[in-house]
Each structure stands twice: as structure tokens, then as C-alpha cells.
Amino acid sequence: MKVIKFGGSSVASAEQLKKVLAIVTDEPSRRFVVVSAPGKRTNKDKKVTDLLIQFYNAVVYKHETEELIREIVARYTEIAAEFRVDDDIEKNFSAELRQLQENYDETNAYALDSFLASGENLNAQLVAACFQKNGVNARYINPKELGITVSNEPQNARILDESYDKIYQWRDSEEILIIPGFFGYTKDGHLCTFSRGGSDITGSIVAAGLKVDMYENFTDVDGIFAASPKYIHDPELIEYATYREIRELTYAGFTVFHDEALMPAFKAQIPVVIKNTNNPDCQGTLIKKTFENENRNEVVGVASDGGFCGITIGKYLLNREVGIVRRVLQILEDLNICFEHMPSGIDDISIILRERQLTRDIEAELMKQIEEKIQPDQLSIEHGLSVVALVGEGMRERPGTTSDSTAALARKNVNLRMISQGADERSIIFAIRSEQERLAVRSLYYTFFD
């Protein structure tokens, strides 16, 4: 038994949905289908979720909305027409969007969630209707009916453990269930979304709840590659990867898979495969807890991401000052700032942060509090940093990987602002200037994959 999830590009048009229908009906084990909102049909197109954000903003600022409603609904009716689905789709979907507008309440913390989730919710209804029109015993099921109960965190919901037993009750469904991704319901009945891209999370949750044999995630690429194609021409496909390897790679910039989506499957030890809707015969990337017999590289991938900054705190005999790190962390906590890395020396600490957390005012307050509470000899902040991660289970207890990687970067004159390796030795993370990101990725990739 399998849960199968299709991303936005896989359901962007009638042509793509025909591929989805063929894939689902090709294997009787594919009983549970999770869908995203329709994505882009061309590079110049807009995702339905982006249109819904525009719609929400128009409602908030009391702008004209009828044209936007027609544009959003047209994305669905174009598909419905190709499948000869009932003409009521246009009327019903337009009514649902207008109902959202009428029910908008600026004091409701979940208002945006309802607008965002409508892309997936309408699409699941449409996909179920298209399947039925083609003789498939399928039906739409709302996440509340399925049992997806989440925390009270608008746009950042987390699954509650009680959901899994509720979901399991649907395991023997005779119908193929079409499930909208991206959202669940709080205990008090509020629709609440996962973080954006969260349809992957829904797929993983449903797979874990149903205790299936496999979770298949279909997208528009053949799988996960060992490096970004924007930096490497024709990079190697990662055929096998562990949950932890993919978690490290997605953290550091890989975008094929949502970085939170593996956790439910990981806990349930359900294998995950990433495949291509446009090339379903390709084996894709298989993700499991461990691999024993497969021949795998010591390094499975090189990932990178920009948008970081680094704060350096210098103070003589810092290593002998009891509680200094605790005081630094307290400052970050008080300002609701997460840190990514914090390497230290005998007289200094470096703090790597994501820049998106720092407005001009927050940055000024952060530096002020460090000055007042830490009283450093030197204090500086450096913007425009990227992180590059070298990831692989095979790096564990293997001498030479760090020296090979730093030598590769040195040959290209890539200056390291930070190097960090976790105790599990699955990854080495470098902080560099963002303008050297491409050079660093290429240097590391061709060192370990050439």
C-alpha cells in the first residue's frame, strides 16, 4: 500500500493531470493521493497559491476582487473542461472564494490560512471529480474528516500525535481518497496551514498514519541530485539516501523536498521515493533509514544556501568567563532570534544567523544588548554570507574528508568564514561570502564526484 503525493507542477494543467491519473491507476497499491494547488504551467505563469495571496491582500485592503476570483477559478475550469467535468465547478468554486471574502475577519489569526489552503482544497475536489469521470472509484476527503489535527500555530502548524490513530481508521477504504495537502484543523476547529510547501508534510503524515509500505512524492525532476543544476551541468542523481542525509541537504538549500516533510515518515520508518511525473519510469531517489548493501559514495551531495549573516564577539579570556554563552543565548531568545551555528575559540564566538530575522531595528537592538550585557572587546556583524554543506553517511570515521574539502576550496581561493562539523560526522558546513557560493559548490562537487 502506498501514499502518493503530487506537487504543484504535476497538477498545473489538464495535460499534467492526465499523467497523474495514469500513474495512480498504473498500480493498485496507490490508494491515497495527496495533491498540491496547481503550480506554474510556464515560466511566466503564476502559481495558484500566489494568486490566492493577491486575493487575500485585495480583501484586506478592500480592493476589487472579481477579476482575481475569475483568474483563480479559470485555472480549475480549464482542467475541468478537458475532463468534461460538471459545469457547476465554476459556480461552486467561485462561491467558495466569495464566501472566504465575506467571512474575512481581521481579528482572526487564521484568516490567511483559510485563503492559502483553498488552493489545495479546491484542487482535491477537482481531481476527485476528474478521476470519477474516468471511471475511477475515488472521492475527495477533507483533512478534518481524515483526522489531521494540528497545533494552534497559524501558517506554521505541527501535527498532533492523536492524528495518527484517526488517520489509520481509513486504511481499508475501498475508494481512492484524494486529500488536499498543506493544512489540518486545530482542536477547536480552526483551519490551520503548515509552513509553505507543506503539502509534502501532509503526504508524510498520511503515510505514517496509514502505516503504508511506501510514500511516493512526485515532482517535476527525476529525483534529488548531488548538487544544484544551476551550478553543475548534469549532476549525478542520488539514487539512495538516508533520512538524515536528506534532512541535512534540505536544510542547506535543496528545494525538491520540504525540509520538515521527512519527520513523520522518518519516525514511522517508511521509505520515501522522489519521482518525476513527466518521467515515471525513472527510479528516482529512494530515502530510507539505513542502507547496507547498496554501493554509495562517501559524500552524497553538496548543497548551498544564501541569506546568512555572522556576528563575531571577541573578548580576552572568554573561555574562562562562566555563563557567557548562556547570556548570549538569552539575548537571542529575548529577541526571538534563532541561531544556526555558534563556533567558538578561546577569545571569540561567532554566531551564524539567517538574515531574514533581522530588521534594521532588531539588528540595532541585538548589537546594543550584546555590547551592554557581554561587554566585548570587539563586536562586528558581517552580511552577505552563504552556507555550503558537504553531506554523506560515508564521511563518518573516515579520515581525510575535511582536509580534501578545505584543500579544494583553498585551490579556488574560497575564504572560509566558518567551518562546522557535527558530532555525528554526517556533514561539514562552511560559511563563505555569497559571491563565492557557485565557485565553492563546483569545487567541492568535482572533488568528490568527478
Image: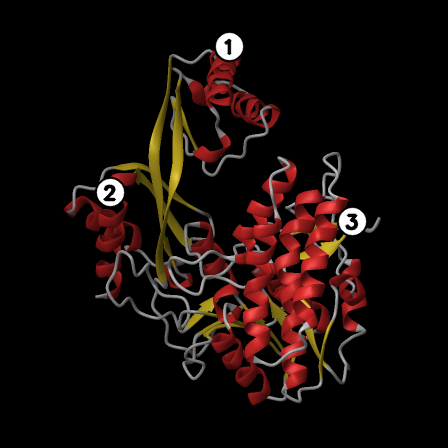
Q: CA distance from mark 2 to mark 1?
A: 34 Å
Disc 1 residue crowd, few under 14, some 14–19, many 20+, Cα 10 Å: few
**Which residue shows up at 51% across the image and 17% down it?**
365
The quadrant in which the C terminus is found is: bottom left
Q: CA distance from mark 3 to mark 1?
A: 43 Å
Q: Is residue 217 above or below residue 150?
A: below
Is the residue 290 above or below the residue 248 in the image? below
Chain-order first, disc 2 or disc 3: 3
Q: Are marks 2 and 3 in contact (CB under 8 Å)?
A: no
Residue toward you, 290 or 156: 156
The residue at which mark 1 appears reads as 372
Quarter occupied by residue 206:
bottom right
Disc 3 vs disc 1: which is toward the camera? 3
Q: Position of residue 348 (x, y in %)?
A: 39, 23
Question: Of the residues tagged 2 and 1, which is closer to the observer?
Answer: 2
Of callouts 3 and 1, the N-terminal one? 3
